[in-house]
Image: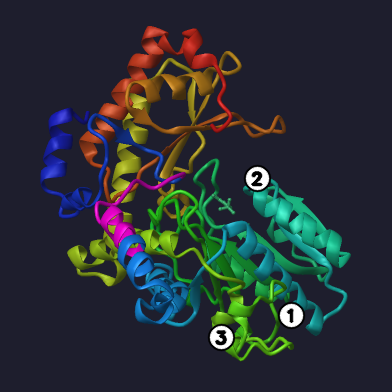
C-alpha cells in the first residue's frame, strides 16, 4: 500500500516538480481545478502590468506595430500549435471556444456540402459540453440542417451518408474519457465526413497530434490547462488542406487579406488569419502568452518537444495514484469511478460518482473546498449521467503528496459526515 512517505519520495525524484514554482498558488491549497480555471503563472502580473503601463500607457497606438500587438493572435497561436501537433501558421489565439466552434462548424458544413449537398447532419455526443451542442443547434437552425446526438458507443453507427460533420470533444468534461482521435477521424473520413475536435480538456493536458490524426478542424480553451486567466482567448486550428476552401462566417476585418486597405469588399486572408474576426484583447493575450510559456518550459525541462510526453507520464501517474488511494482508503462510502481505467482512454482528470442522498456529491465538493482541496461538481443530466465530483490533475503544479492529502481529506469528509453540514448544502451560481 502506498504511504505518504512514498509520495514524498516520488516528488523528490520528479524532474518536473520545480515547475510548480512557475505558479503563484495560495498556501495551503491543493488545486485540482486547473481543468476549469488554470492558476496564475508568476510571470503574468508583471507582463500584464508592462503591457498596460508601457505598451498602452506610454507607447499608445504605436504598440500595434512596435509591441507586435497586431501579430499577437498568430504569435501565441504558433506556440499553442507546438502543444497540439499543428504546424506554425496553422493556429490563431482568438475569441472564445464557443465563437470559434461556430466558425469551424460553419466552414466544415460549407466544405462538406460543396462536395455533397445531401449531407445535412451534424453528429455529436449527448454528453458533450452543452455550449458545443448549443452552437451546433443554432447553426443547424440557420442552415436548415439537423443535429443528431448519440451515446459514445453509437458514434460509429451514426456515420451515415447524410452526415456532414462529426463534432466531438476529445476529452469529455464530465468523465475524463478520451477518444482515439486518429481512429475516430479515420472512421469519419472513410464515411466521407469531416471532423471538428474540441480540445478544451486536452491542450496542455494530454498529447494531441492533429496533423498525425489528419483531423480537419479543432478549437480549444485558453483558460483551462493553458493557464491564460479568466476569459482568456481560445484558439482555432484548421487543417491547411481546408483553410482556403471556405469563408468562416464572422468575416471581420482582422480576417481580411488587407485590413488596412479599408476596401468595402471582403477578401479573406490566406491561411488561418482568416479565422480572426475583430480587434483582440491585448491584455488577455499577454496573459495567455505567459500561460502557454509555462507549458513550453516543461518541454525544456523534459527535453522533449512540448514536454507533453513527460507531462503525460506524470499525469497518468497522478491519476493512477488518486484512483488507487480513493479505492483503498475511501471505500464503503458509495464512491464510483466515472473515468476510464485504461490509460489510452483517460484524460488528466478523475471523476467520481457518489451513491446515496441527492446532493451528496455537491456537498462533498463544498466540504473539500473548505479544507483547501479545490475540485468541482458537475450536475447529472437526469438521463443516465450521474452527478460528478471532478478532480483535475495538472502535472505542471500537482505533486504526489498533494494527491495523497486530497484523498485523505476526501476520506475525512466522508467518514465524519462533515459534508452534511448546512453550509455545504447551499448552492452557488457557479459550480
Ligand atoms: C470549457 C469548455 C468550453 C468553454 O467555452 P467558452 O466559449 O470559453 O465559454 C467549451 N467546450 C468545452 C468542451 C469546454 O470544456
Question: Is residue 389 visible from the viewing direction of this image?
Answer: yes
Q: Where is residue 27 in the image (x, y as percent from the top left)?
A: 22, 32
Mark 1 residue element: helix
Label 2 neighbourhood size at 10 Å, few (<14), some (14-19), many (20+)?
some
- Tell me: residue 211, above or below residue 348: below
| Residue bearing the label numbered 3 | 271
As for residue 95 lying within the magenta part, the answer is: no
* Display colour scheme: rainbow
In the image, is 108 to the left or to the right of 30? right
Q: In this orientation, which residue lies closer to the viewer: 133 or 2?
A: 133
Q: Position of residue 256 (x, y in %)?
A: 62, 84
**Chain-order first, disc 2 or disc 3:** 2
- Tell me: residue 9, above or below residue 257: above
Q: Quadrant of residue 192?
A: bottom right
> Residue at image x 72%, y 73%?
249
Q: Position of residue 190 (x, y in %)?
A: 68, 75
Mark 2 residue element: loop
Q: Position of residue 91 (x, y in %)?
A: 49, 75
**Chain-order first, disc 1 or disc 2:** 1
| Residue bearing the label numbered 2 | 127
Label 1 neighbourhood size at 10 Å, few (<14), some (14-19), many (20+)?
some
Q: Give the residues in magenta.
A: 36-51
Which of labels 2 and 3 is toward the front?
3
> Residue at image x 50%, y 57%?
221
- Rendered image: mark on residue 111: 1
Mark 3 residue element: helix
Which of labels 1 and 2 is toward the front?
1
Q: Are marks 3 and 1 in contact (CB under 8 Å)?
A: no
Amino acid at each position: 500500500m502506498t504511504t505518504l512517505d512514498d509520495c514524498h519520495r516520488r516528488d523528490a525524484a520528479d524532474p518536473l516538480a520545480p515547475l510548480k514554482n512557475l505558479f503563484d498558488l495560495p498556501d495551503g491549497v491543493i488545486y485540482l481545478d486547473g481543468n476549469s480555471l488554470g492558476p496564475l503563472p508568476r510571470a503574468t502580473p508583471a507582463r500584464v502590468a508592462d503591457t498596460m503601463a508601457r505598451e498602452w500607457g506610454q507607447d499608445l497606438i504605436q504598440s500595434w506595430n512596435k509591441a507586435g500587438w497586431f501579430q499577437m493572435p498568430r504569435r501565441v497561436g504558433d506556440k499553442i500549435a507546438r502543444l497540439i501537433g499543428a504546424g506554425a501558421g496553422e493556429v490563431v489565439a482568438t475569441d472564445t471556444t464557443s465563437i470559434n466552434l461556430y466558425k469551424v462548424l460553419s466552414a466544415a458544413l460549407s466544405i462538406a456540402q460543396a462536395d455533397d449537398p445531401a449531407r445535412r447532419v451534424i453528429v455529436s455526443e449527448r454528453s458533450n459540453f452543452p455550449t458545443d451542442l448549443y452552437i451546433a443547434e443554432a447553426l443547424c437552425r440557420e442552415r436548415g440542417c439537423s443535429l443528431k446526438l448519440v451515446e459514445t458507443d453509437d458514434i460509429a453507427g451514426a456515420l451515415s451518408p447524410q452526415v456532414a460533420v462529426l463534432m466531438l470533444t476529445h476529452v469529455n468534461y464530465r468523465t475524463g474519457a478520451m477518444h482515439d482521435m486518429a481512429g475516430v477521424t479515420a472512421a469519419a473520413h472513410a464515411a466521407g465526413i469531416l471532423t471538428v475536435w474540441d480540445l478544451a480538456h486536452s491542450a496542455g493536458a494530454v498529447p494531441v497530434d492533429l496533423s498525425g490524426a489528419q483531423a480537419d478542424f479543432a478549437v480549444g480553451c485558453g483558460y483551462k490547462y493553458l493557464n491564460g486567466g479568466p476569459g482568456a482567448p481560445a484558439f482555432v486550428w484548421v487543417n491547411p488542406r481546408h483553410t482556403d476552401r471556405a469563408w468562416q462566417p464572422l468575416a471581420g476585418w482582422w480576417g481580411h487579406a488587407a485590413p488596412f486597405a479599408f476596401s468595402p469588399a471582403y477578401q479573406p486572408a490566406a491561411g488561418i488569419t482568416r479565422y480572426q474576426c475583430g480587434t483582440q484583447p491585448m491584455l488577455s493575450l499577454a496573459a495567455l502568452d505567459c500561460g502557454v510559456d509555462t507549458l513550453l518550459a516543461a518541454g525544456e525541462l523534459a527535453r522533449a518537444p512540448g514536454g507533453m510526453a513527460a507531462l503525460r507520464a506524470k499525469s497518468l501517474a497522478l491519476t493512477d495514484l488518486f484512483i488507487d488511494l480513493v479505492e483503498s482508503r475511501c471505500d464503503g462510502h458509495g464512491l464510483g469511478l466515472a473515468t476510464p481505467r485504461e490509460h489510452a482512454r483517460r484524460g488528466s482528470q478523475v471523476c467520481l460518482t457518489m451513491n446515496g442522498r441527492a446532493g451528496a456529491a455537491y456537498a462533498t465538493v463544498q466540504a473539500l473546498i473548505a479544507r483547501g482541496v479545490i475540485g468541482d461538481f458537475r450536475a447529472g443530466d437526469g438521463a443516465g449521467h450521474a452527478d460528478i465530483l471532478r478532480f483535475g490533475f495538472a502535472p505542471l503544479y500537482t505533486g504526489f503528496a498533494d494527491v495523497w492529502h486530497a484523498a485523505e481529506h476526501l476520506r475525512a469528509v466522508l467518514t465524519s459526515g462533515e459534508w452534511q453540514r448546512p453550509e455545504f448544502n447551499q448552492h452557488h451560481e457557479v459550480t
